Image (cartoon, rainbow, N blue to C red):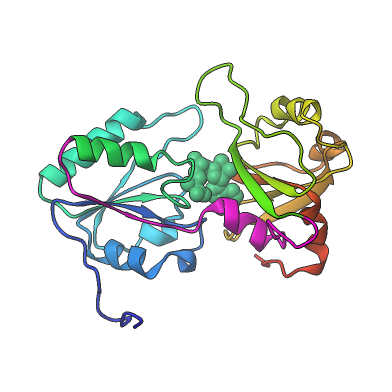
Amino acid sequence: MLPTLTEPHRPARRGTVYLVGAGPGAPDLLTIRALRLLQTADVVVHDSLVAPEIYGELAARCIDAGKRSGDHGLGQDGINALLVQLAQENLAVVRLKGGDPYVLGRGSEEALALAAAGVPCEVVPGVSSSLAAPLLAGIPLTHRGLADSFCVVSAHPQHEGQLPDIPPFSPRRTLVILMGVHTLSQWLPQLHALGYPETLPLAFVLRASWPQARAWQSTLGRCLVDLEQHALASPAVAIIGEVVSLRDRLPQEQP
Ligand SMILES: C[S@@+](CC[C@H](N)C(=O)[O-])C[C@H]1O[C@@H](n2cnc3c(N)ncnc32)[C@H](O)[C@@H]1O
């Protein structure tokens, strides 16, 4: 049965931290469970990628724990400690993270830190940008005859000097690269070395589901030249594979 839209059906409990996925940006891509928890939380600790429209009018106290490039904010240890402290003050805490909390978002590290401190924690899935950004730009990640699998990769190495963990080219696999907008010139040669053809279509989807959403399409061989005509702002997702060529025939979200 659908929850009634006027009554919280899963109110946030005191002394508990909810790791909640906020989706890619647009408030109406939140889940109903996420909305109910936000409406009943005492405090919301949010990321910089979460749209202000989502937390701007909440009754809860809001804390920005955002890590912008060049500014590490509280740092991961500081965020973990803050979540433990707020729960130990017997508050109902929502930790609101962009997309899905367990997709390249360090949500599982936060859950482990809470478990180690004996703090009750629940995790609420969100719509990951790795799925939403391609879809909203008219790109299916799989399509019969073109791709029957996809791989989501972080271009941001876990350790300095490490290369992104990109699999060798397969004509039937779509590659989705997160956190790769500012480092395109670094991972592009790796794709060539792994057998990805120059003619393979590539698309960048910027700020998917936000009012400023944009997408542009190129090929692996041309994209560095094309990039000069397109200001690439983050956050953005790169999609690489034949499925990109369906874009002109499939619905795209108009910002
Ligand atoms: C730290 S990762 C977090 C991913 C998040 N947990 C998720 O499931 O979407 C941040 C990266 O997600 C991608 N991203 C997040 N929101 C986006 C959006 N609205 N449009 C395009 N890319 C987005 C970008 O690649 C960005 O660098």
Q: Position of residue 214 (x, y in %)?
A: 69, 55
**Residue 74 seen in render:** no
- If the image is split into quadrants, where does the N terminus sit? bottom left
* Residue pictured at 41% horizontal, 38% vertical: 106
Q: Position of residue 184 (x, y in %)?
A: 71, 32
Q: Residue furthest top?
A: 161
* Residue pictured at 72% horizontal, 70% vertical: 251
Q: Is residue 230 left or right of residue 181?
A: right
Q: Is residue 202 left or right of residue 118?
A: right
**How many labels, in total?**
0
Magenta stretch, residue numbers: 117-146
Q: Residue furthest left?
A: 89
The image quadrant that residue 219 belongs to is top right
Note whether 194 is above or below 92 in the view shown.
Answer: above
Q: Position of residue 97 (x, y in %)?
A: 40, 49
**Residue 13 seen in render:** yes
* Residue pictured at 43% horizontal, 35% vertical: 67
Instruction: Give the dominant element type of the magenta stretch: helix, strand or loop.
Output: loop
Q: Position of residue 157 (x, y in %)?
A: 55, 26
- If the image is split into quadrants, where does the C terminus sit? bottom right
Q: Is residue 227 left or right of residue 166?
A: right
Q: For residue 155: magenta? A: no
Note whether 55 is above or below 4 in the view shown.
Answer: above
Q: Nearer the viewer, residue 227 or 250?
A: 250
* Residue pictured at 62% horizontal, 29% vertical: 164
Q: For residue 125: magenta? A: yes
